């Protein structure tokens, strides 16, 4: 279906997957045909045509990635070094975990 609509990032891919599960490929193709313009329509335009609103929770990552965990660890280390207090980092770890 990516050949019919504009898909720029992971959120767009997840949105398209959600649409395919909830309205089906035939409905998406029909909505694409109804969208004005010569190029591929944006997913938001297709959703408006279909009269659906994608739940935010269905297109957001539910688990943290290893890259995000390493980044948070690096930030905590920088904060500990700059503040000279490991207590601040310990207090923040519970917030971000």
Image (cartoon, grey):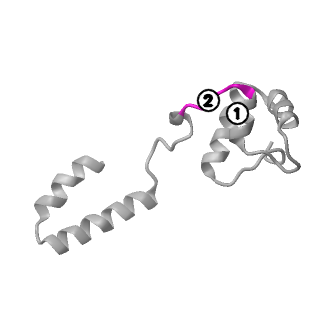
Q: Main secondary structure of the magenta part?
A: loop
Secondary structure under tag 2 reads loop
Q: Give residue 40's position: percent from left, percent from top.
A: 82, 48
Question: What separation in Å lies between label 1 and label 2 (alpha carbons)?
Answer: 7 Å
Q: Is residue 46 magenta?
A: no
Taking the image as shown, residue 11 lies to the left or right of residue 19, namely: left
What residue would you read off at disc 2?
53
* Above or below 55: residue 10: below
In the rendered image, residue 7, in percent from the top left (x then y), is placed at 72, 50
Residue placed at 17% from the left, 56% from the top?
90
Assign a secondary structure to mark 1. Answer: helix
Q: Is residue 61 above or below residue 55?
A: below
- 10 Å neighbourhood of mark 1: few (<14), some, or many (≥20)? some
Name the residue that disc number 1 marks. Answer: 47
Q: Position of residue 86 (x, y in %)?
A: 13, 64
State the residue at coordinates (19%, 60%).
89
């Amino acid at each position: 279906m990516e050949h019919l609509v504009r898909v720029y990032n992971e959120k767009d891919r997840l949105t398209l997957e959600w649409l395919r599960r909830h309205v089906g490929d035939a409905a998406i193709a029909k909505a694409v045909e109804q969208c004005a313009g010569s190029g591929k329509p944006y997913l938001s335009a297709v959703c408006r045509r279909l009269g659906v609103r994608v739940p935010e929770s269905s297109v957001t990552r539910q688990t943290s990635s290893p890259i995000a965990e390493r980044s948070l660890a690096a930030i905590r280390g920088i904060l500990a070094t700059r503040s000279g207090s490991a207590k601040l980092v310990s207090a923040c770890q519970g917030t971000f975990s």
